[in-house]
Image: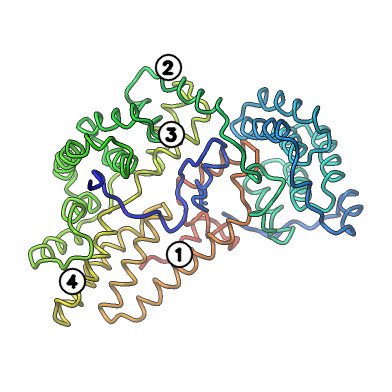
């Protein structure tokens, strides 16, 4: 059976997408997906702490790889609660873990993070001493020490402090950290699914239920059918696209496929008519349900040229969409509203139209004259240029790929090289940022700031984190 809501493969990087139960698992949210995508400055000079001097001569030694399962589970619960801002629940779970294993380094890291979050400097210092004793020479402990020092300066944000701490330590790679949450695969925590089900049951409005379903770790049949029922009511193109992404694959029962395709098409026609300036919607209407890789007809190319002249890729603000979703979920009392909102709105950037265009360009070039190829190149470049203006990494990268291919077809070598250099810069920024594993650190305020900044301009955020320039300067010259 054909997928009722076909969509392109995964993004080339990470868009806020919820992966499993832990907060850090959405993290991609900034990049590395998913995994979860800053402004880098040189670390401030200053004297080392006594513990840095004491341990710097010792070779880094990873914490014990394993602990009894009850300790691992309690530590995981503590980390998840800490990351979502539920300090009381986090401390309860942490006490359980440390009672069973007082020197369990991952639990001690959570304890230090809770103290830093609470602004309890004395408690943070004591917890870090224990962490260093349990994991001598660990970069995680060193970073938290530096973070503690930097946060003492008035007006220093969590993001700024983390960035400076990371840079001052030589930008260590935490991707294989055995201390950060998520290092050890664990069986699913049944309380997570139970909590999500309870939140869904308590929801009193379709708006809240829509966002909960879009932000869910895994759709059940009730949620999938609910999303389908909402499609004819969706007036926001971003939410329409988010639902389309959520229902791709096998989310719906096969018996609903024909109805789904009909409903989605009918609503797309309405939305495209209501938003004639939106290149995204017009492109999706023109090519979204066509065969990928097939040559375009002359009529399709003519229509595509008109689409490429439209003024905007999409009309809504991604940051405003996130803010509205966040506020709605927070007002409804949804736990971890920011992560759920981010996961929900991230679905709105998965774009089938531009992806099909790239595949059909390949099938069309051989059918055209040299001038026709140049014309198709201009069309692709102009569509890509509108996508490059968007604030998400997925759209920016997809747009740059269209610009690269379009300028190549036009014989514009300078434009092609510029697009490639921007692609390389973003690839490098993503690779560097992955090393921070920022979304795995159980610091609620840090990840809240991360989501806030990331939704405003993800590529600029990533580039500035690595380059050390203000975000407004790091976005680069657009082609």
- Spatial separation of the CA atoms under disc 2 and disc 4: 52 Å
| Mark 3 or mark 1, whichever is nearer to me | 3
> Quick one: SS at disc 3?
loop
Q: Label 1 crowding class (10 Å Cα cut-off): few <14, some 14-19, many 20+? A: few
Q: Nearer the viewer, residue 443 or 147?
A: 443
CB atoms of marks 3 and 1 within 8 Å: no
Question: Eyeballing the image, is 88 above or below 217?
Answer: above
Q: Which residue is mark 2?
A: 202
Tell me which label, 4 or 1, sits earlier in the chain: 4
Q: Which residue is mark 3?
A: 216
Residue at 26% from the left image edge and 62% from the top image edge: 383
> Quick one: SS at disc 1?
loop
Location of the C terminus by quadrant is bottom left
Q: Which residue is mark 1?
A: 476
CB atoms of marks 2 and 1 within 8 Å: no
Q: Label 3 crowding class (10 Å Cα cut-off): few <14, some 14-19, many 20+? A: many
- Spatial separation of the CA atoms under disc 2 and disc 3: 15 Å
Where residue 186 appears, as percent x and y from the top left, is 62, 38
Q: Which residue is mark 4?
A: 364
């Amino acid at each position: 059976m054909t997928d009722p809501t076909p969509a392109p493969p995964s993004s080339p990087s990470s868009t806020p997408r919820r992966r499993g139960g832990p907060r850090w698992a959405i993290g991609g949210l900034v990049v590395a997906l998913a995994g979860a995508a800053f402004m880098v400055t040189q670390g401030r000079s200053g004297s080392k702490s006594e513990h840095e001097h004491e341990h710097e001569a010792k070779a880094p030694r990873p914490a014990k790889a394993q602990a009894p399962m009850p300790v691992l589970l309690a530590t995981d619960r503590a980390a998840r609660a800490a990351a979502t801002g539920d300090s009381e629940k986090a401390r309860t779970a942490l006490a359980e873990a440390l009672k069973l294993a007082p020197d369990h380094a991952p639990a001690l890291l959570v304890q230090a993070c809770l103290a830093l979050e609470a602004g309890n400097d004395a408690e943070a210092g004591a917890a870090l001493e224990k962490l260093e004793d349990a994991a001598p020479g660990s970069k995680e402990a060193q970073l938290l020490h530096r973070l503690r020092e930097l946060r003492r300066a008035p007006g220093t944000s969590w993001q700024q402090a983390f960035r400076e701490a990371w840079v001052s330590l030589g930008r260590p790679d935490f991707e294989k950290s055995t201390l950060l949450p998520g290092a050890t695969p664990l069986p699913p925590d049944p309380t997570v699914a139970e909590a999500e089900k309870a939140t869904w049951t308590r929801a009193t409005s379709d708006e809240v239920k829509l966002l909960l379903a879009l932000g869910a770790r895994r759709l059940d049949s009730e949620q999938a059918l609910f999303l389908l029922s909402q499609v004819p009511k969706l007036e926001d193109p971003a939410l329409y696209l988010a639902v389309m992404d959520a229902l791709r694959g096998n989310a719906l029962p096969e018996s609903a496929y024909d109805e789904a395709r009909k409903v989605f098409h009918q609503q797309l026609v309405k939305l495209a008519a209501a938003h004639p300036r939106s290149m995204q919607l017009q492109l999706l209407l023109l090519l979204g349900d066509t065969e990928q890789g097939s040559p375009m007809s002359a009529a399709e190319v003519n229509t595509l040229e008109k689409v490429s002249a439209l003024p905007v890729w999409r009309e809504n603000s991604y940051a405003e969409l996130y803010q509205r979703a966040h506020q709605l979920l927070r007002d409804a009392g949804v736990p971890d509203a920011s992560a759920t909102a981010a996961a929900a709105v991230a679905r709105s950037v998965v774009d089938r139209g531009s992806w099909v265009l790239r595949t059909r360009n390949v099938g069309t070039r051989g059918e055209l004259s040299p001038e026709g190829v140049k014309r198709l190149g201009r069309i692709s470049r102009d569509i890509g240029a509108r996508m490059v203006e968007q604030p998400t990494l997925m759209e920016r990268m997809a747009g740059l790929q269209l610009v690269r291919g379009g300028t190549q077809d036009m014989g514009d070598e300078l434009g092609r090289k510029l697009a490639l250099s921007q692609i390389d810069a973003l690839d490098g920024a993503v690779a560097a940022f992955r090393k921070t594993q920022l979304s795995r650190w159980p610091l609620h305020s840090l990840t809240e700031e991360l989501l806030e900044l990331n939704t405003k301009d993800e590529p600029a955020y990533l580039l500035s984190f690595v380059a050390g320039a203000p975000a407004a300067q790091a976005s680069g010259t657009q082609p």
